[in-house]
């Protein structure tokens, strides 16, 4: 009986000691994933400004569409409250900001140097885990000011306006998930 009590006490102590390390690893994995997404958005926006010519407002110009993925909370990743592009106060250098916050954590803010981000309606905010489309377009105002990158929430290819993360994906292995029906073989 004493062995069982000691084994349970040891298991509980080991579990209590390992939980903070697991939580730190989950947060670190989510931070790494979101930092990659922020760098991808900044890289696409900077690429537009560096490589393309801006057009006047209302005239279709150079665009880039990219997919931003927010990690889903699970054993390997911490949850994400939001990823927000634009409309935050600028950073100390006066650059526009992309920010995100892990569930229960502190907001992380990243300046976007060399790019003027414009979110015409409101900031672009993603709160649901999964893949989301983002459209970046290069524009120049009517008075000929510096080019700016107009950021808008993208739509799905079907144009439904719903985020791809909210659509149900096809099953990974449909033949394995469907019931097995034996085939009838006729021998003549």
Image (cartoon, rainbow, N blue to C red):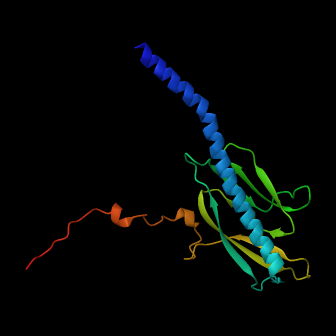
Q: Closest to the observer: 9 or 155? A: 9
Front residue of this view, candidates 63 and 122:
63
x then y, percent, for residue 7 = 47, 21
Q: Position of residue 76 (x, y in %)?
A: 57, 47
Task: Work out which residue is located at the far left of the displayed protein and give it.
Answer: 188
Report x, y in % for residue 43. 76, 69
**On screen, residue 51 above or below 183:** below
User: Is 129 on the left-hand or right-hand side of 144?
Assistant: left
What is the quadrant of residue 130 in the picture? bottom right
Residue displayed at 78% across by 71% down: 45
Quarter holding the N terminus? top left
At a point 86% along the width and 65% down the height, the residue shown is 113
Q: Position of residue 95 (x, y in %)?
A: 87, 62
Identity of the residue furthest to the front in this view: 3
Vertical relation: 3 (above or below) 16: above
The quadrant of the rendering that contains the C terminus is bottom left
Q: Residue at x 79, y 54 (%)?
A: 109
Toward which corner of the image does residue 147 lie, by quadrant? bottom right
The total of numbered circles placed on residues is 0
175 horizontally vs 15: left or right: left
Residue lying at 92% horizontally and 59% vertically, measured from the top left: 93
For residue 2, side relative to residue 182 (left or right): right
């Amino acid at each position: 009986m004493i062995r069982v009590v000691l084994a349970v006490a040891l298991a509980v102590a080991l579990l209590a000691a390992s939980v903070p390390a697991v939580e730190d690893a989950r947060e670190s994995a989510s931070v790494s994933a979101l930092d990659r997404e922020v760098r991808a958005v900044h890289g696409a926006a900077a690429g537009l400004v560096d490589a393309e010519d801006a057009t006047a407002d209302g005239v279709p110009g150079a665009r880039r569409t990219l997919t931003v993925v927010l990690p889903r909370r699970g054993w390997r990743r911490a949850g994400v409250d939001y990823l927000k592009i634009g409309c935050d106060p600028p950073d100390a250098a006066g650059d526009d900001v992309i920010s995100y916050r892990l569930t229960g954590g502190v907001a992380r803010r990243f300046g976007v140097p060399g790019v003027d981000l414009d979110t015409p309606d409101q900031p672009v905010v993603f709160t649901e885990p999964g893949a989301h489309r983002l459209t970046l377009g290069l524009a120049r105002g009517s008075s000929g000011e510096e080019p700016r990158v107009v950021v808008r929430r993208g739509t799905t290819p079907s144009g439904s306006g719903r985020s791809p993360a909210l659509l149900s994906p096809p099953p990974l292995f449909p033949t394995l998930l469907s019931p097995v029906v034996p085939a009838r073989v006729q021998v003549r």
